[in-house]
Amino acid sequence: MPRIEGGKTHVLTVGELSARSGVAPSALHFYERQGLISAERTAGNQRRYRRDTLRRVAFIRVSQRVGVPLARIRLALDSLPSGRTPTKADWARLSRMWRSELDERIAALEHLRDDLTGCIGCGCLSLRTCTLQNPSDTLGATGTGPRRWADVTTS
């Protein structure tokens, strides 16, 4: 049942959450199945989300946009309090937890930005002739695919 204080409802339907967040209801249901957000159920089995779910959905979307895997996002969200709306201090703590990981991602993206044109432009793509990025094709021995950036973007 929605809690009402001062004439304002403190829960959102899936449609309201979707409209406010810009995220499709199907994505919200997926986030719920993945344990990223949670909803209460009405007697008619309809979902009701606390208003602070808007911040969680925004965090999920921004994190996904920069390539953070859902498992890491879930761990971060699990560190936030569940019995109350997260405070500025809670979000600051989460930010400190992610700072070094985000700095590593930024460095990897800068490296990709700076070297991608030269790497793709030379046409070797990890062949023995690339003395700049992969001398003697040492990365070819470690497996297929883009070896240099794979470790950074999949953690």
Image: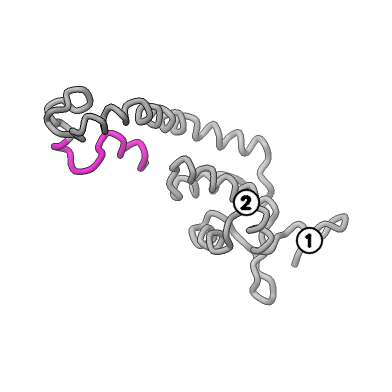
- Residue 76 at x, y = what percent? 52, 44
Quarter of the picture containing the N terminus is bottom right
Q: Using the image as rendered, state which of residue 147 and residue 51 is in the foreground.
A: 147
Q: Is residue 141 magenta?
A: yes
Residue sitting at 54 percent across and 31 percent down?
Answer: 96
Residue sitting at 50 percent across and 30 percent down?
Answer: 99
Q: Farthest residue toward the right?
A: 6
Q: Which residue is label 2 attached to?
A: 82
Say which mark, if any, is on residue 3.
Answer: 1
Q: Using the image as rendered, state which of residue 124 and residue 136 is in the foreground.
A: 124
Residue sitting at 18 percent across and 42 percent down?
Answer: 143
- Residue 2 at x, y = what percent? 76, 64
Secondary structure at badge 1 equals loop
- Identified by mark 2, the residue type is Ser
Q: Is residue 21 left or right of residue 62?
A: right
Q: Farthest residue toward the bottom?
A: 44
Figure check: 137 above or below 59: above
Range shown magenta: 140-154
Q: Is residue 26 left or right of residue 117?
A: right
Q: Nearer the viewer, mark 1 or mark 2?
A: 1
| Circles 1 and 2 in contact, beta carbons < 8 Å | no
Q: Is residue 45 left or right of residue 64?
A: right
